[in-house]
Amino acid sequence: MLEALEQIEVALRVRTAHCIGAQDPFAHLNATHLDTACCLAPVQTRKG
């Protein structure tokens, strides 16, 4: 079961990277490609 989820995760990561890379090979370095509302939102963590 976990192996199947891992394969899905890797496939989504590759697809996302391919799409972003097609727009700009250095998109990961350009902050204008990021959603500022999402990036500035506080991270909630679980304690336990």
Image (tube, grey):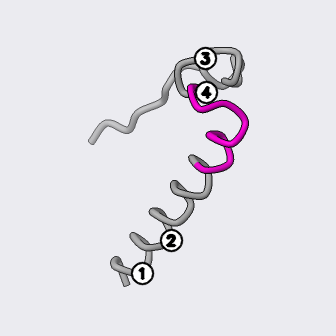
Residue type highlighted by circle 4:
Ala
Q: Nearer the viewer, mark 3 or mark 1?
A: 3
| Residue at the spot of label 4 | 27
Circles 3 and 1: CB distance less than 8 Å? no
Residue type highlighted by circle 3:
Asn
Does 38 appear above or below 40?
below
The quadrant in which the C terminus is found is top left
Disc 1 on helix, strand or loop?
A: helix
What's the magenta region? Answer: 18-27
Circles 1 and 2: CB distance less than 8 Å? yes
Distance (Cα) linking label 1 and label 4: 29 Å
Q: Is residue 19 magenta?
A: yes
| Residue at the spot of label 3 | 30
Residue at 50% across, 71% down: 8
Mark number displayed over residue 48:
none
Distance (Cα) linking label 3 and label 1: 32 Å
**Mark 2, residues whose alpha carbon is within 10 Å: few (<14), some, or many (≥20)?**
few
Mark number displayed over residue 4:
1
Circles 3 and 2: CB distance less than 8 Å? no
Residue furthest out toward the bottom = 1
Q: Position of residue 14 (x, y in %)?
A: 52, 57
Residue nearest the observer in this picture, 5 or 17: 17
Q: Earlier in the sequence, mark 1 or mark 4?
A: 1
Q: Earlier in the sequence, mark 2 or mark 4?
A: 2
Snapshot quadrant of residue 40: top right
Residue nearest the observer in this picture, 10 or 39: 10
| Residue at the spot of label 2 | 8
